Image (cartoon, rainbow, N blue to C red):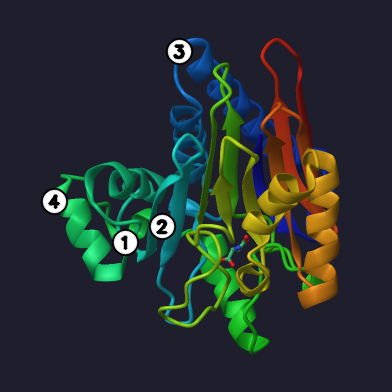
Amino acid sequence: MVHGGAGALDNVKDDKTAFRYLEAIRRTLEHGRDVMELGGSALQAVEACASILEDDPVFNAGCGSVLNENGKVEMDAAIMDGRDLSAGAVAAVDNIANPVQLARLVMSESEHVMLISEGAMRFADHCSMERVPEDYFYTTDRVEQLRQARLQHKVMLDHDDSDADSEDQKYGTIGAIARDPLGNLAAATSTGGIVNKRMGRVGDSPIIGAGVYADNETCAVSATGFGEDFMRSVISKTISDFMYMKGMDAKQATEAGIEYLVRKVKGRGGVIVIDKDGNCSSGFTTKKMIHGWIEKSGETSCRF
Ligand code: ASP
């Protein structure tokens, strides 16, 4: 399963724009399936899918990342392997094309789970990860989106519910989760965060248990929405706990998780979930969430 962000998405009125999103999701899902058909693991599949979405400027991750209060990009990403709960995360990084790949290197090449900011960038250099120039990130849409947010003195989701008519709200945070034929689960989430956020603000996406979680005994989860709500409710781990402690399946645990999110913190956003038996589920409190899923030999399903 992959998602491309939660929010209003009311600007996706015309078929052409909708087609652009759904095509991106469909192509990414098919690539993820190819990775696993060629023997790749769930972990490899989610890294590959997240990287593709980071390379697509219509999404709020990698090259399409939104801008912070200083007009700068600060990206967060995480990846988790359900086989042994190993995980890697980076926060407030810039000048790299694929934060999810850096997160993967933190997981596999360091003894840590999370690196941030300058330390993460030094680690990227240590791993010989190529740096990209600042103008790799700045699309005219993103600059205009920040201008609007500043005018309204607010921080906002890439697809903000509260200002659904704004033309600039058309991209989203990304996430990928997978279960491979061996039953291994993995999850990845990557984002530019929220528009006009404070410098140094870190959201849920790189926080294990909040924006991302994978455990072979329960499920894989990726979240999107207002990160502060997801951090306070530890939503991804909460959904996993519903399965572990109450024996729920993907659908039941997603519903219980969304109910908890709303009741406790009036959470705004959504999740995609695959349980240990391969059942797919999604839930969101925003008007829409771009997402889709694909099975071993089935059709792709993509929707808002
Ligand atoms: N969850 C992300 C964050 O708060 C934003 C999003 O999902 O669009 O950084």
Q: Residues within 10 Å of mark 3 (few under 14, many from 20)?
A: few
In what element is the residue under mark 3?
Answer: loop
Q: Earlier in the sequence, mark 2 or mark 3?
A: 3
Decide: few, some or many residues near mark 4? Use Cα within 10 Å; few <14, some 14-19, many ≥20: few
Cα gap from disc 3 to disc 4, whole angstroms: 29 Å
Is 292 left or right of 150, judged from the image as shown? right
CB-based contact (under 8 Å), mark 2 and mark 3: no
Q: Which sits earlier in the primary sequence, circle 3 or circle 1?
A: 3
Q: Which residue is mark 3?
A: 39
Quadrant (top left, top right, bottom left, bottom right) of the C terminus: top right
Of the two numbered discs 3 and 1 in the rendering, the one whose residue sits closer to the viewer: 3
Residue indicated by mark 2: 137
Q: Which mark is residue 134?
A: 1
Circle 4 sits in a helix, a strand or a loop, which is it?
A: helix
Q: Quadrant of residue 259?
A: bottom right
Give above or below for 263 relative to 1. below
- Cα gap from disc 2 to disc 1, whole angstroms: 6 Å
Mark 2 and mark 3: span between their CA atoms? 33 Å
Amino acid type of the residue that numbered disc 2 sits on in the rendered structure: Phe
Mark 4, residue position? 126
Point out the tag, 3 or 4, that comes first from the N-terminus: 3
Q: Is residue 150 above or below residue 128?
A: below
- Percent of width and height locating residue 58: 58, 48
Residue located 54% across and 18% down the image: 182
**Amino acid type indicated by mark 4:** His
Q: Residue at x 63, y 65 (%)?
A: 234
Residue 264 position, x and y percent, is 79, 75
Residue in the image at 53% along x and 59% along y? 205
Q: Which mark is residue 290?
A: none
